[in-house]
Structure formats: structure tokens, C-alpha cells
Image (spheres, rainbow, N blue to C red):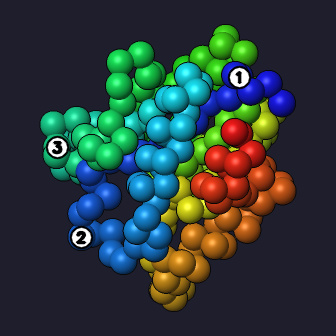
Amino acid sequence: MNTDKRALLIIDVQMAFHHEKWGKRNNEDAEDNIRKLLIHWREKGWTVIHVQHTSDNPDSLFYPQQEGFAFKKIIEPIKDEPIISKKVNSSFIGTNLEEFLKQNGIETVVITGLTTPHCVATTTRMSGNLGFDTYLVSDATAAFGLKDHNGTYFDAETIHNTSLATLHEEFATILTTEQILSLFE
């Protein structure tokens, strides 16, 4: 494992996810855990990449002129940290993320962010399929409750854990913040 060729990917940690429309969320500590990882990455001088979801719809919480578009203050990018703007669930589709990682010789991608079953899971699948050594930090992501096609409601913790289960050992290694910090010390 090449220690300086790893990237921390922080997906969609934006103010939009404070909106009541999403409902109940699990893992209220996700942003604090992302912050711990972010501090560690910055101290080590490793690559940090921020992903920001954007919408062309003026009514969307993710429209650039809406308050929800902004990054949450706890993880705001600093100078020289790339910001990838995306319009779909995958951070790789319609962006230069794959090109950036390859041009910089980055082989290991550590994924955090919001939300587990959507942009986090989609990006994790693609990262694994593209051949990156992919880690997903289980307590540095979160989910909201969802209804299925039959109208059955699944609480946020169930959605989160089921999403992680579909990714584990197939597309990524699932670890906690403390396990990642210990592994990448």
C-alpha cells in the first residue's frame, strides 16, 4: 500500500441535508467522524477531494443559488483541495475524478459523505469497479429512512446497514473511522 497515494473523498456534505424533507437520519456523528479523518489527512499531506452535488433545477436544494448548495462548515475545503462538481449519484460520471486520481497516481480511495444508499454507494461501486483499492468508512456516512416500491418504510439505520452490506467485500472494505485512522497511521 503506497501511503502517499491515497485520497479521502468527502461526498455531498452539504447544507441541503439539514432540510426536513429528508426525514429521520441515522449516525448524527458522521460529520464529526469525517472531520477527524479530514484533520488526519491534512496533517499527513495526503489528497483530500470534496464532491459537491449540483442541480440545474432552481427549486432543488442543491441548486447553486440555494443555501443547501453550500458545504457544511465542519468540513469546508481549504485552498488547493480539489472540488468535484457532479450532477448524478456517481462522483465519477460527468466529472474528472477518475482522471485526477490516475494522473496523481492515487491507488487507494477512502470514501465518506452523504448519503449511504445514494451517492456514497454509487461512487463506492464505481471506485471498486475501476480498480481502486476502496475503503468506505461506515461511521463517516449516514442515511435517511426510505419507502420501497410497495410503500413499506425502512428506518435510516436499516437503510444504512443494508447499503453497507451490499458493498462490503464486493466493492470496498468497510471500516470505522478509528479503524481507518489506525490502518493509515
Above or below — where is 12 with respect to 139? above
- Looking at the image, which residue is at 73% across and 32% down? 108
The local secondary structure at tag 3 comes to loop
Residue under numbered circle 3: 66
* Mark 3 touches mark 1? (CB < 8 Å): no
Q: How many marks?
A: 3
**Three-letter amino acid code at disc 2?**
Glu
* Picture quadrant of residue 168: bottom right
The local secondary structure at tag 1 comes to loop
Residue sticking out furthest to the bottom:
152
Residue closest to the eye, 81 or 52: 81
* Mark 2 touches mark 3? (CB < 8 Å): no
Residue under numbered circle 1: 5
- Looking at the image, which residue is at 37% across and 42% down? 75
**Mark 3 or mark 1, earlier in chain:** 1
**Image depth: mark 1 or mark 2 in front:** 1
Q: Quadrant of the C terminus?
A: top right
Residue 98 image point, x, y percent: 64, 24
The 10 Å Cα crowd at callout 2, few under 14, some 14 to 19, many 20 or more, is few
Residue under numbered circle 2: 20
**Image depth: mark 3 or mark 1 in front:** 1
Left or right side of 136 for 57: left
The local secondary structure at tag 2 comes to helix
Above or below — where is 92 with respect to 122? above
**Three-letter amino acid code at disc 1?**
Lys
* Picture quadrant of residue 85: top left
Residue 105 image point, x, y percent: 72, 15
Left or right side of 185 for 160: left
Question: How far apart are labels 2 and 3 at the CA level?
Answer: 15 Å
